[in-house]
Image (tube, rainbow, N blue to C red):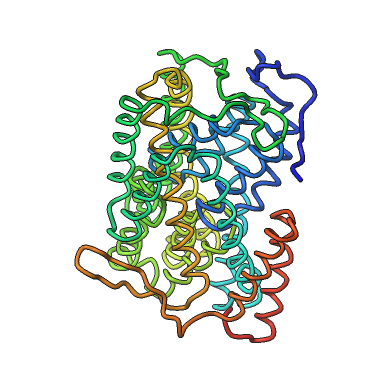
């Protein structure tokens, strides 16, 4: 049964924010984002699933089409699309301060968790017990993501042409290794063509409460009150670029242009601009540079950092914090190694995520107005359909790596398949996945409650030395 969390009411009936920028009280929104932030496991697929369930289905704060429109824009940007979607939705609900709260809380638990795990890794070289907790969460996310794919598909793929577009996007990514930007560009063109020659395929279902729930607080056809302007764009651009660059310039002046901090700040500022298609699209390059060029860590340590980032809340690109932590600890300059590690990790986190706020605050008012442009709207609807295929592909990737120790790449002409080695199945992870699926699908437990049970199971399996953790 779906529950609602309707605010009191400082919002207009049409869902347009008041002059103060709040559709709902900021305190209420902050509590919701705080709860969401501790459930953001499983990469983009799991994170989008959590927001879909909390904001669209349970609280009814935003309509499905509005959510899809925002997600389509975020998929076009470099950086973690799930965090950008949180910023966009926070901006819709509470203006700029809402976007800042949502985006910051979205990554904060992951920052704190990975800092603690990085410190344990450096101090003891082993994080078995803590990793066991998170290892219990990873297979649980497989069930959560499976639920997300079905729910998003059911609400977004309202015509057979959109279903075909989603399937084609999944096949392009999973079977032919087509670059993510090419898939998104092709989906936009396909959406435009569908809108031109078969516009009825893009019409959303009638009504907002097709599942029997209350209508959303922000309807699909409402416009945000904040209008784009040259003055606003210039102000945000200047402030954003200063906030992004000043810490890097400061460490360059204080520690020298050749210090590890300056190098990390400049390098990860660059990677923040090229992470199209999610973290996986850029992690190979980051690993190569961090290991071979800069020598910040070893290949084995890079794999360990990726595993820690996979099983902590927040975007997977958070692994760069682990990379910076180890690199700065081993080359601290005149600083204490622990202080250097903390500085390197926080600086890297800053330059990685600040651009996300800049992209959303600059573009969101324009994207809101483009919802009335039929051609642009059709292109974005095509991207939305492709996003279902993208989430399904990410879900498959995550399931394979969560449930199997080895996944081999097999090529059959133009087809490239990632096939798990069935002999390397993780029994404990598989068992926890089955339990999580029963809790979520059969007993309809909340995500947070199911994750808590699975974390305890993972810890117990790790302490008992069971295989598959």
What residue is shown at x 65% (from left), y 80% (from top)? 462
Give x and y (percent) for residue 309.
52, 62
Would you identify the image quadrant in which residue 183 lies? top left
Front in this rendered view, residue 468 or 239? 468
Front in this rendered view, residue 329 or 464? 464
Give x and y (percent) for residue 163.
42, 44
Q: Is residue 60 above or below residue 426?
A: above
Give x and y (percent) for residue 15.
65, 20
What residue is shown at x 35% (from left), y 63% (from top)? 287
Q: Is residue 422 above or below residue 7?
A: below
Residue reaching furthest to the right = 8
358 left or right, relative to 222: left
Q: Is residue 262 above or below residue 243?
A: below
What residue is shown at x 31% (from left), y 24% (from top)? 196
421 left or right, relative to 6: left
What residue is shown at x 35% (from left), y 42% (from top)? 273
Would you identify the image quadrant in which residue 436 lies? bottom right
Give x and y (percent) for residue 28.
75, 33
Would you identify the image quadrant in which residue 92 lies? top right
Tell me the quarter of the image containing the C terminus: bottom right
Number of labelled discs? 0
Residue reaching furthest to the left = 413
């Amino acid at each position: 049964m779906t529950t609602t969390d309707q605010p009191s009411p400082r919002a207009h009936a049409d869902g347009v924010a008041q002059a103060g920028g709040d559709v709902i009280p900021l305190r209420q929104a902050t509590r919701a984002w705080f709860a969401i932030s501790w459930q953001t496991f499983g990469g983009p697929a799991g994170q989008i699933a959590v927001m879909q369930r909390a904001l669209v289905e349970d609280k009814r704060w935003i309509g499905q089409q509005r959510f899809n429109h925002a997600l389509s824009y975020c998929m076009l940007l470099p950086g973690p699309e799930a965090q950008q979607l949180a910023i966009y939705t926070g901006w819709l609900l509470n203006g700029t301060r809402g976007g800042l709260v949502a985006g910051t809380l979205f990554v904060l638990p992951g920052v704190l968790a990975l800092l603690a795990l990085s410190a344990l890794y450096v101090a003891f070289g082993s994080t078995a017990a803590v990793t066991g907790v998170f290892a219990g969460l990873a297979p649980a996310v497989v069930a959560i993501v499976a639920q997300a794919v079905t729910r998003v598909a059911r609400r977004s793929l309202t015509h057979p042409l959109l279903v075909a577009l989603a399937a084609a996007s999944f096949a392009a990514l999973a079977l032919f290794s087509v670059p993510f930007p090419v898939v998104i560009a092709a989906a936009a063109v396909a959406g435009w063509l569908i809108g031109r020659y078969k516009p009825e395929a893009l019409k959303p279902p009638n009504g907002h409460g097709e599942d029997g729930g209350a209508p959303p607080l922000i309807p699909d056809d409402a416009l945000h009150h904040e209008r784009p302007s040259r003055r606003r764009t210039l102000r945000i651009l200047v402030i954003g670029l200063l906030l992004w660059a000043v810490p890097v310039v400061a460490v360059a002046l204080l520690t020298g242009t050749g210090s590890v901090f300056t190098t990390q700040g400049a390098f990860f500022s660059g990677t923040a601009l090229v992470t199209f298609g999610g973290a996986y699209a850029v992690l190979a390059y980051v690993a190569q540079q961090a290991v071979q060029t800069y020598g910040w860590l070893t290949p084995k340590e890079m794999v360990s950092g990726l595993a820690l980032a996979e099983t902590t809340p927040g975007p997977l690109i958070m692994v760069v914090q682990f990379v910076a932590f180890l690199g700065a600890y081993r080359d601290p300059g005149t600083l204490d190694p622990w202080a250097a590690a903390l500085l390197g990790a926080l600086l890297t986190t800053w330059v990685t995520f600040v651009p996300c706020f800049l992209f959303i605050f600059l573009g969101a008012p324009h994207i809101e107005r483009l919802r009335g442009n039929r051609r642009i709207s059709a292109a974005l609807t095509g991207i939305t359909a492709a996003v279902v295929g993208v989430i399904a592909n990410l879900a498959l990737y995550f399931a394979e790596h969560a449930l199997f120790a080895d996944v081999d790449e097999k090529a059959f002409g133009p087809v490239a398949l990632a096939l798990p080695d069935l002999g390397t199945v993780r029994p404990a992870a598989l068992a926890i996945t089955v339990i999580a699926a029963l809790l979520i699908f059969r007993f309809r437990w909340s995500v947070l409650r199911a994750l808590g049970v699975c974390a305890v199971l993972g810890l117990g399996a790790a302490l008992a030395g069971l295989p598959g953790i």
